[in-house]
Amino acid sequence: MIHVSGGCHCGAVRFRAEMPDPPVPALDCNCSVCSMTGFLHIMVPHDQFELVTGRDALTSYRFGTGAAEHLFCAICGVKSFYQPRSHPDAWSINANCLDRPVELAIEIFDGRHWEQAKAALDENDAAG
């Protein structure tokens, strides 16, 4: 496991997390919000993530089914992590918000066709 840190642009929101050794699995989603914000997903189980500062700086946004909770810094507007619909037991950290880049193994996630993409992701996870 590697230890990483990161946060938003203004520094109000800061986190620490543990991730698998590189290359770290990541998802590149093409849904409307991810493609507009350039979010590159690294899934981290809740117990391997710590919000260090900024809980009071976070503002929440939900759309569609409302299952995902998108958390943005109310000061600078950056979404450094959020609670994804696809992985309810993990936080999704934006790889672009890490203090130091990590080597990634990027998989495409077709968020514009979410149900099919989630089924394919689950199938890949079950296979190995």
Image (cartoon, rainbow, N blue to C red):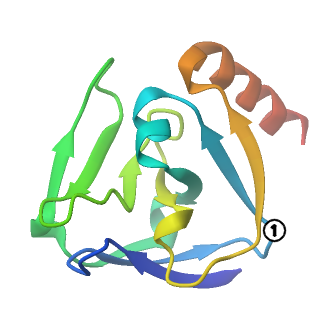
Query: Residue 42's image quarter?
Result: bottom right
Q: Residue 63 vs residue 86: left or right? A: left
Q: Residue 59 vs residue 107: left or right? A: left
Residue at image x 36%, y 35%? 68
Question: Residue 46, percent across and down?
Answer: 45, 60
Q: Is residue 24 above or below residue 22?
A: above
The residue furthest right is 127
**Tally of numbered discs:** 1
Residue at image x 43%, y 28%? 32
Question: Residue 87, percent across and down?
Answer: 53, 40
Q: Residue 121 vs residue 56: left or right? A: right
Of 24 and 110, which appears nearest the observer?
Answer: 110
Pointer 1 residue: 23
Q: Is residue 125 above or below residue 4?
A: above
Q: Quadrant of the N terminus?
A: bottom right
Query: Residue 120's image quarter?
Result: top right
* Type of the residue with mark 1: Pro
Residue at image x 67%, y 83%? 2
Residue at image x 55%, y 82%? 4
Per the image, label 1 sits on a secondary structure element best described as loop
Q: Quadrant of the C terminus?
A: top right
How many residues crowd mark 1 within 10 Å: few (<14), some (14–19), many (20+)? few
The residue furthest front is 36
Question: Residue 29, percent across and down?
Answer: 59, 37
Question: Residue 109, percent across and down?
Answer: 66, 33
Query: Residue 118's image quarter?
Result: top right
Q: Is residue 17 above or below residue 112?
A: below
Of 21 and 108, which appears nearest the observer?
Answer: 108
